[in-house]
Amino acid sequence: MNTLDTRDAVRQLLPWHENGTLNDIERERVRALLATDLEANRQRRELHALREALIDEPTLASDMGSNLQRLRAQMGPSRAIAYMPMTARWLAVAASAIVTLGAATFYAGTRVGPYQTLTAKAAVEPVAADADLVRVNVAAGVDAAALMQLAGDEQVRVLNGPSEHGVATLAVPHARAQEIIARLSADPRLRFVAQVPR
Amino acid sequence: MQSPNDRFRPNTAPDNAEAADDAACLAAVVRGDREAFERLYRRYYERLFRFSLRVTGRIHLVGDVINETMMVVWRRASEYRAAAQVSTWIFGIAYRKSLKALARDGRHNAEAIDDVPEIELQMPETVDRDAMHAEIRQAIACLPPDHRAVVDLTFHFNRSYEEIAQILGCPVGTVKSRMFHARAKLRPLLGHLLGD
């Protein structure tokens, strides 16, 4: 950049030297220019007149009260109410998403965990036709092996459980079902024993 | 250090205390505080009136521009980022609203510099100070809106060229260029009035 370009670049800062917003370095550069450059001084006088003319302009602002009144009407009664439609929209979107997800799960027959839906039965082990189902509720510490031992019959099978709540389902031979139920019921570690209709 | 011309400095550029209060008011507006909003409205009404009138040159547009600007402040206060002063953000909104209002009003606001008619000089033999200022203001009114905005933000609102660039949403070089062309347009009148 030659001297002429530099002078032009500094002259471009004159308006902001006039309004006092230049930083220290820029201000020093402008001052140095003004000390030697007649054209910069002429431009400075112009800018000074320009600035005076704008500052001297009478204030025209009026009708603030009525304009504010108009704006209040546009703003509505309160921010909360103004934003309510947006909130309602979000709630509607969330509700739709939940319903859609539920419907999709239902009709797809997807089982969530060990539960069955109306369209998909919970998976169960095949049980022999001549076996009865017995539902038991055992005390803590009684596992499937102990349960089979308590049943006292080699053909008894634990289909599921005991769950964390102590519930288990057994398959027992139909011919000895009552006998096995009576044996289990007599044991204090079993709180509940009942035959389940198939 | 301040400019030697500080005696002409109007109280339009926000000082630190006012800038801090602006920020506090805006934070309250985010929470839905109408009193804080109306405080901002009252503080900025006159400034926006003047700025919008300078940019549009049409007084019948000004009320709507102010209210549209402040409605944006009310609705989008949460979008304000503290990188710029609140006043810079508000003036930026007002500038865009002013240009839109001008466009709606039937005159495109982005004339090329070459399309702007030459300023007709009223050349009185002698001019007093008030008449001279009126002449200058009339000449400024003949500039394109974006040039008028740069001139007004510089000389009335005492904004730095960086702030003006933020308000107008353009590079600093564009601000300087607009100022250069505005001054070139005004030079014949100013030269005459100053006896150069």
Image (spheres, grey):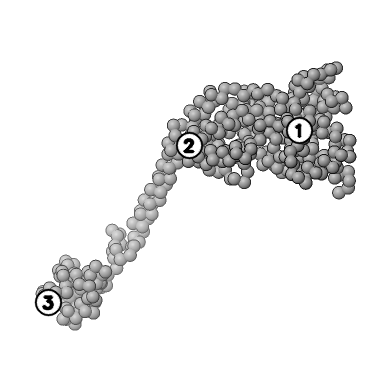
Mark 3 is surrounded, within 10 Å at the Cα level, by few (under 14), some (14 to 19) or many (20 or more) other residues, namely some
| Residue at image mark 3 | A183
Name which residue type carries label 3.
Arg
Chain under disc 3: A
Near-viewer residue (B71 or B6): B6
Q: Position of residue A131 (x, y in %)?
A: 18, 74
**Which amino acid type is shown beneath numbered disc 2?**
Asp
Three-letter residue code for mark 1: Asn
The number of discs equals 3
Q: Nearer the viewer, mark 3 or mark 1?
A: 1
Residues behind callouts 2 and 3 on a single chain: no
Which quadrant of the structure image shows residue B97? top right
Location of mark 2 (residue): B33
Dot 2: chain letter: B
Can I make out residue B91 in this image? yes
Number of the front mark, 2 or 1: 1
Q: Which residue is mark 1?
A: B5
Q: Helix, strand or loop at disc 3?
A: helix
Q: Residue at x 82, y 41 (%)?
A: A31
* Tag 1 subunit: B
Circles 2 and 3 in contact, beta carbons < 8 Å:
no
